[in-house]
Image (spheres, rainbow, N blue to C red):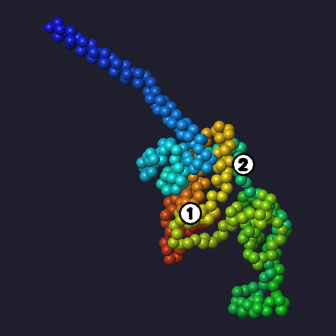
Amino acid sequence: MELASGRGSRRSASAASWGSRRSFSIHSQAADPFGRAASQQGHHDDEENLRWAALEKLPTYDRMRRAVVHGGAAVDGHENTEMEGLVDINRLASGEAGRALLERVFQDDSERFLRRLRDRVDRVGIDLPAIEVRYQGLSVQVDAFVGSRALPTLWNSATNFLQGLVGRLASSNKKTIHILQNVNGIIKTLLLGPPSSGKSTLMRALTGKLDKSLKVSGNITYCGHTFEEFYPERTSVYVSQYDLHNAEMTVRETLDFSRRCLGVGARYDMLSELAAREREAGIKPDPEIDAYMKATAVQGQESNIVTDLTLKVLGLDICADMPIGDDMIRGISGGQKKRVTTGRC
């Protein structure tokens, strides 16, 4: 009996000891509820630092094609763990992974998104490309018929055709009309003027889209360079009031086609310089912004994250996969077509 009571006392003591340890563990967790979260955050920071260290050791060419992604981009409502860590940028430049990255970066706040981009560039002192358009002594004139002779009648059309055949053998009744005469200025973000004051002609002249039959004099420069020194189509564009699209192509296909025609431009060179300056200064950029900027510089893809951003900014993401349409094919509305025209530019 004494032995049994001794065993019982030892069991009760052991149970009491286990209970006290369990109670102490519970109380210790209650006393420090953020301990585990802090430990997990520290472990996460260590992993991210290791990823950045591995990225910095890569050659420049490979470093521009890798990005540090943490958290896993959610695809179709599920977290994609394959898109976590040191990821090939080609996998983020298009498709569902690219759209998921854009959602995380953009977050329906264009001002905050642009501010994050600008902050990264300003930290290393890179000046974003700016364009100054000057026109000095710009004059545009045309020889045309006036009065009843300018009416589009059958007789006038036949007469114009015969005069075109005769050419210089007969005198012409055309008069010289000055559309623009000795115009000077620097282009701003807004251009106002009364009807028939030459606004459209001025805009066409500034973008190099004037008809060859017009006589043009004066100088037009972009940052001090004339049209002969660069490609104006890659710098400026004249958006016509007429929307000319392929009716059978979807909105996304139309914007993708325009983006591939223009290419990535100077984005890759600017990003390379940005990464080099950050490396010299020991600055670690925002991982999401870094991944986005690298994804925009990827060449040779049918679809790109730039197209998704354009769709979102212009409010065309709701009709991205709809055909443009025309009188025979049902498509998007007239206002959406105008936004597609703007997006193509």
Quadrant that contains the N terminus: top left
Pinpoint residue 189: horizontal percent, then vertical percent. 72, 58
Disc 2 marks a residue whose amino acid type is Asp
Disc 1 marks a residue whose amino acid type is Asp
In this figure, which residue is indicated by the disc labeled 2? 127
User: Which residue sits at x=47%, y=32%?
Assistant: 40
In this figure, which residue is indicated by the disc labeled 1? 256
User: Which residue sits at x=27%, y=17%?
Assistant: 15
Locate residue 20: give its quadrant.
Answer: top left
Pinpoint residue 96: horizontal percent, then vertical percent. 48, 54
Name above or below for residue 58 compared with residue 138.
above
Locate residue 216: give its quadrant.
Answer: bottom right
User: Which residue sits at x=44%, y=29%?
Assistant: 36
User: Which residue sits at x=58%, y=71%?
Assistant: 245
CA–CA distance in space, label 1 to label 2: 28 Å
In the current view of this chain or complex, which residue is farthest to the left?
1
Taking the image as shown, residue 1 lies to the left or right of residue 188, namely left
Q: Residues within 10 Å of mark 2 (few under 14, many from 20)?
A: few
Locate residue 300: give its quadrant.
Answer: bottom right
Pinpoint residue 255: horizontal percent, then vertical percent. 57, 63
Taking the image as shown, residue 312 lies to the left or right of residue 266, namely left
> Of residues 50 and 289, which is closer to you in this image?
50
Q: Residues within 10 Å of mark 1 (few under 14, many from 20)?
A: many
Pinpoint residue 320: horizontal percent, then vertical percent. 51, 62
> Of residues 223 and 282, which is closer to you in this image?
282
- Classify mark 1: helix, strand or loop: helix
> Of residues 185 and 16, which is closer to you in this image?
16
Quadrant that contains the C terminus: bottom right
